[in-house]
Amino acid sequence: MRATASAITIDCLDPGRLAAFWGALLDRNEVPSLPGWHQLGNRGDAALRINFQPVPEPKQGKTRIHLDVTVDDIGEGIRSVLRLGGRETGERHDYDEGVVVVMADPEGNEFCLVQYYD
């Protein structure tokens, strides 16, 4: 049996808002999806599809799974997230191989901006 990760689904109150945020951040286009859902990318794309599923309750607690978003410049990446409506969490980790800054999307879902040093 072959298993392949093909998509990630994010529960959210406002799927359209989050699809717009993530689409702009990742330079991905929205494609038709299920009623009430929003989706970035198609099945078979090189990058994972991202689905935004409407749920009635807001996020509570720390996100148990998150995306890592690699950027060329950590400062510009942070400014882009803020400009798009995300926020900083105040958490940063500096390693020999690069830097990781924990950010949050407009609904508070944490993700990491990562800049690797070559």
Image: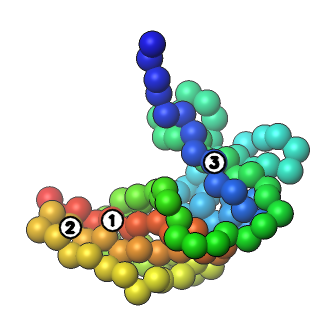
Which residue appears farthest toward the top when viewing the image? 1
Which amino acid does the dot numbered 2 rest on? Gly
SS of the residue under disc 1:
strand
Q: CA distance from mark 3 to mark 2?
A: 27 Å
Quadrant of image for the N terminus: top left
Name which residue lies at 86% across and 50% down: 36
Quarter in which the C terminus is drawn: bottom left
Furthest residue to the bottom? 90
Q: Is residue 16 visible?
A: no
Q: Are marks 1 and 3 in contact (CB under 8 Å)?
A: no
Q: Residue at x 54, y 82 (%)?
A: 87
Crowding at label 3, few (<14), some or many (≥20) Cα neighbours within 10 Å?
few
Label 1 crowd (10 A; few <14 / some 14-19 / many >=20): many
* Pointers 3 and 2 in contact (C-beta within 8 Å): no
Residue where numbered disc 3 is placed? 9
Dot placed on the residue nearer the N-terminal end, 3 or 2 = 3
Q: Amino acid at mark 1?
A: Val
The one nearer the camera, 27 or 42, is: 42
Q: Position of residue 69 (x, y in %)?
A: 42, 60
Q: Marks 2 and 1: in contact by CB < 8 Å?
A: yes
Mark pair 1, 3: CA separation: 21 Å
SS category of the residue bearing label 3:
strand
Q: Position of residue 4 (x, y in %)?
A: 47, 27
Residue beneath label 1, please?
A: 114
